[in-house]
Structure formats: C-alpha cells, structure tokens
Amino acid sequence: MAKRREQWSSNFGFLMAAAGSAVGLGNIWKFPYVAGHNGGALFLIFYIIILVVIGIPILIAEMSVGRATHLNSIDACKKINPKWAFVGVIGFLASFVIMSYYCVIGGWVLKYIATYIVTDKINNPATFFNEFCSSSIEPIVWLFIFIAITALIVMNGISNGIERISKIFLPLLFLFIIIIAINSLLLPGASKGVKFFFVPDFTDINSAGDVGKIFLSALGQVFFSLSLGMGTLITYGSYLDKNANIPKNAVSIPVLDTLIAILAGLAILPAVFAYDLEPGAGPGLIFQVLPVVFANMPFGRFIAILFFVLVFFAAITSAISLLEVVAAYFIDHKNVSRNAAALGCSAGIFIAAIFVSLSFGALGGFKVLGKNIFDLFTTLTDKILMPIGGFLMCILVGYVWGIPNMLKEISSNGLYKFRYKTAISATLKYIAPALILTIFVVSFL
Ligand code: PFF
C-alpha cells in the first residue's frame, strides 16, 4: 500500500519553514556587504525589482511543480516529462554540494557560541579564527555536531521536525536581530554604517557597465537568498495541501527574507563603522570583524551570544531544507525509511564536508583550477548549478509543462483568482531565462 505523504500541519508552519530556508548565511554575511559595495540604495532598488519580477514568479513555478506532483524534485521533474528529470538532478547535486560547505560554516558558528559562553571576549579574533579553521580536528567535531542536529530535525519529519523547529527558530531569530539592530543603531558613530548601507555611492559607478554589474550581483543575490533553482521549493511545496494559497506564500517568503536581510545590514554595518572597522564579505565579516566590535561594546558578550545563536538559527533552517531535498528522493523513490534516508544522506554530506573543512588547513594546497575545495564548491553552486537550475526550471514550467497547467495548479481548482497571468507567463518564458543567461555568460567574462 502506498504510504500517505506527509503534510505541513498549517500554512504558518510551511511559511516559517520556507522562509527559514531562504533566510540564511546569505542574508547575514553576504547581503549587507554586497549592498554596501554595490551602490547601497541602488543595489536595494535593483534587488527589489528583480525580486518582484523574477524571484516571485520562479518561487510560484517551483511550488506549483511540487504541489502538483507531490514528489521530490527529481521525480517531480520526471513526472512532468521523463526527459526532464535531469533538472531535478541538478538541484539534488547542488543541494548536496551547498550542504557540504554550509555545514562547515554552521560548525564554526557553534564554536563561536561555545567560546562566548565560556569566555568574556575573543582577543585577537583574526588569529583566533585562522588558527581554529586551519586546524584539522576541532572544526570537524563542530561540523559533525551541526550535521547531527540537522539530521535529527529531518528525521522527525515534516510537521514534527522541520515545521516545529522553524516555527520556534524563525520568530526568535527575528526578535534577536531586532534587539541587535537597535543596539547597533544606538552606538555613537552608527550613522556612517547606515549611510554606507542606504545612501547610494556613485563614486565607483562610472559607466553603464558598472550599473550592469550591480544589476547582476543583485540577480545572483536574489537567487541564492530565495533558495531558487535547487528543488528546495519543489520539495517543500510537495508537502502542501491542495488548498494552500501558493501566490500568497510566494509573496510572504521574499518579504520576510528581505526584511531580515535589511535588519542584518542594520545590525552589522552601524556597529562595524562605529568602531572604525572595514566591513568585509564572507567569513571574515562575522568571524573576524564582529568579534572586535563585541569586545569593545557594552554588553558585548551577551550581544555576541545572541548574534551567533541567531546566525545558527538562520543556518540550521536553511540546512534542513537542503538535507530534505536530498533525503526526500530516497524516501519517495527508493522507499527508504525517513530515518535511514536522513542518516545516510547526512553521512555522505559529512564525508564531503570533511574535505571542505580541511581545505582551510591541511588540504589548503590542493587546488583545482587555482581554487581550493571551498572556493571550488561555492563557485560550482553559485555560478554554475544555481543559474543553470533556475534557467531550466523556467523552461520546464514555461514550455514543457506549460503556463496553463501551472495556472490551474495555483488557482487550487478555481479556489483562488490570480490576476497576473500574462506577467508571469512573460517572465517565465522570456524575461527570466534571458536575464539568467546573461548573468551566466557575463560572470565568466
Ligand atoms: N537561502 C540560503 C541563504 O540565503 O543562506 C541558502 C540556500 C539554502 C540556498 C537552500 C539554496 C538552498 F536550496
């Protein structure tokens, strides 16, 4: 007898889980920096336009494919057209690869929480960070703990595991980030950071090509931040009830995601500027620059714990969505139990992640195309698998499945009216594929 497919217990639960997938390290360490260095307000304007014009339609497309098929991403694409299963395979592979570096960073976050619990402050954060991440054993232990927590949540299932945790972690994250943003904004000298974030700086923008670059960084950020092109939304959508309102959710998810990205900018940048530090992108910003800020600010240790706990919440709710994409395939397709699928996939990810972790130390000299394993994996997903996945998703829904089928799915058999039929059709068939293709080509120039 066929197993009854699991479901979200409420729309709020689904929304928290999907927004939890979107809100992640991308919001906290990428968005504030990328926005600041790409013309501030101009980047924000581009980001919001792309979010509305491309992000929301692709979100709708992915969720409809999931809900229409009630299958994992590979089998969902296969059901639409057997020749197109490879689109799901790309998302599956990309999820696996992203997980392998996301968990390494998740482990670092746990290490920082533990450090601030036992010590007052980190003296000399740059040395502390470099020594820690280049050592062989300790980061792997933290990585293991992070993956074990992710696996445990996924093993508990959709409504009991993923949904339950997201319903607690996301609202708490929101609360913590507001507290930290208020604290940052009250620091003397905070306004420089606010200016860096919001006020357009045109000094570096001299040509149309520069404006084009800002546009492309905004497009890349929208993709990563909304977890698009990876099968995450297909998988989460596949546990949706037939009466769920897809377009409404597709608006709420980016609204929450953007709100948190902006709050992250307000939490981080004013504090960095108040202490005359330089914001940097990526690991450096939260692991090396912010500890200097925490060491100097009143109640720094308390704020540091709050901050790293919120980063942990953001990272784990994204990690569970990535593990679910991989595990769902084995659960649906191979009839493996949820426990075995989650554990088996986590074990595979753990092995790959060990190599990523070692690429900061012992395996640092091992390079492919001039990149260490970490850089190789991030480039492979950000620049290759995600854009290709997004592009193919538009073609699959726009031409292979067809817009009328998608529209039928999102109306929930006539329950909801959808007014933007022409707009979504134009986006999925022409605008989004053309833009993604452009970003893809230009990023290699
Ligand atoms: N959206 C997450 C972030 O902003 O950190 C990253 C991510 C999660 C990307 C899940 C892709 C994905 F499928």
Image: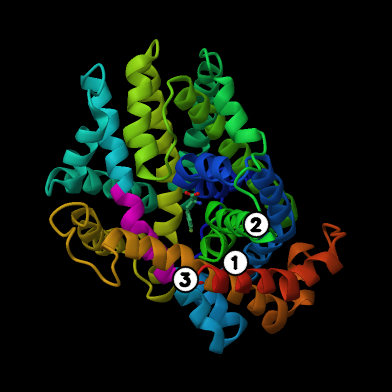
Which stretch is magenta?
92-104
* Mark whose residue sits in front, 1 or 3: 3
Tag 2 residue: 215
Tag 3 residue: 384
Q: Taking 95 as reference, is 118 above or below it?
A: above
Q: Does the magenta stretch mainly form a helix, a strand or a loop?
A: helix
The image position of residue 157, as x and y in percent, is 43, 52
Tag 1 residue: 66
The image position of residue 126, as x and y in percent, is 25, 34
The earlier-in-sequence mark between 3 and 2 is 2
Q: Taking 118 as reference, is 337 above or below it?
A: below
Q: CA distance from mark 1 to mark 3?
A: 23 Å
Helix or strand or loop: what does disc 3 sit on? helix
Q: Nearer the viewer, residue 356 or 71?
A: 356
Q: How is the image coloured?
A: rainbow
Left/right placement of residue 174 relative to residue 54 reads left
The image quarter in which residue 165 lies: top left
User: Is residue 175 visible from the viewing direction of this image?
Assistant: yes
Q: Nearer the viewer, residue 126 or 240?
A: 126
Q: CA distance from mark 3 to mark 2?
A: 18 Å
User: Is residue 407 visible from the viewing direction of this image?
Assistant: no
Q: Within 10 angstroms of label 3, few (less than 14), some, or many (20 or more) residues?
A: some
Report the amino acid beneath label 2.
Phe
The earlier-in-sequence mark between 1 and 3 is 1
Residue for point 49% across, 71% down? 444
Residue for point 58% across, 48% down? 14
Report the amino acid beneath label 3.
Ile
Q: Taking 87 as reference, is 344 above or below it?
A: above
Q: CA distance from mark 1 to mark 2?
A: 30 Å
